[in-house]
Amino acid sequence: MISMRYALWSAAAGALIPVMAVLNARLGRSLGDPLHAPVILFGVGLLACVAVSLALTGALPTPAKLVSVQPADLAGGLIVAFYVVSATLVAPRFGVGNLILFAMVAQIVFSAAIDHYGLLGVPVRPVSVVRIGGLLLMTAGLVITQFANSK
C-alpha cells in the first residue's frame, strides 16, 4: 500500500520541476547567460539545504564523515547539475512540455529497470507484466505527442 503522504510529497516535487526549468531559463536571460543561472540556483539551493539540515537534524556532516563517503556516491551532485543545466538550456529551445515528457518517461523506465535488477544496491522489486504494459503505454504516449507537435 502506498503512503499518501509520500505520494503527495513526490507529486509536489515533480510538479515543481517544470516550474524550476522555466524560472531558471528566465534567470539565465536576466543574467545575460543561461549557464550563469545554474550557478545561482545551486547557491540558493545550497543555502536552503543547509537551513533544512540544521533545522531538522541540528548539524551538518563532519569532515570525518565526508572522507568516508564512496566517491561514486557523490555522482548524484553531477547528475543534478547535468539535469539543471540541461533544463536551463533545453526548455526554451525544445519546450518545457517536451523536456519534462522525455525526462519523465526516461525516469520511469530507468527506475523500473533499477528496481527490477536491484541496480546500485536497491532491493529487487520485479517488474510485472502489467507494469511493462504501462511503461509501453507511456512510451507510446510520448511518441504520439511528438507526432502531434510535428504538424
Image: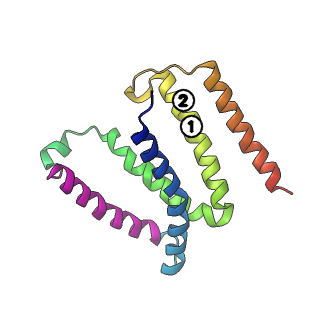
Quarter of the image that includes the N terminus: top left
Q: Which colour scheme is used?
A: rainbow
Viewer-proximal residue among 18 and 7 = 7
Compute the Cα span from label 1 to label 2: 6 Å
- Which mark is on residue 121? none
Which amino acid, by three-letter code, is at mark 2?
A: Ala
Q: In this view, does 134 lie to the left or right of 114?
A: right
The magenta segment is 36-60
For the view shown, which residue lies furthest in the right direction?
Answer: 151
Secondary structure category for the residue under label 1:
helix
Query: Which residue bears the numbered disc 2?
Result: 112
Asked whether residue 42 is drawn in magenta, I would say yes
Residue 91: give x, y in percent of width and height: 61, 62
Label 1 amino acid? Answer: Ile
Q: Position of residue 42 (x, y in %)?
A: 37, 63
Disc marking residue 108: 1
Q: Seen in the image, is 29 located left or right of residue 97?
A: left
Instruction: Please say if the residues under marks 1 and 2 sit with CB atoms less than 8 Å apart.
Output: yes
Name the spot of residue 82 as percent of width and height, x first: 48, 54
> Magenta part mainly helix, strand or loop?
helix
The foreground one among 134 and 41 is 134
Question: Splitting the image into 4 quarters, where does residue 96 fall?
Answer: bottom right
Task: Give the quarter of the image for residue 130.
Answer: top right
Q: What element carries label 2?
A: helix
Task: Give the residue at x 52% y 19%.
Answer: 126
Q: Quadrant of the C terminus?
A: bottom right
Nearer to me, 56 or 25 = 56
Question: Where does the image place residue 112, in percent across and percent down from the top left?
Answer: 54, 29
Q: Residues within 10 Å of mark 2 (few under 14, many from 20)?
A: some
Residue 57 magenta-highlighted: yes
At 40% from the left edge and 29% from the top edge, which residue is drawn?
A: 120
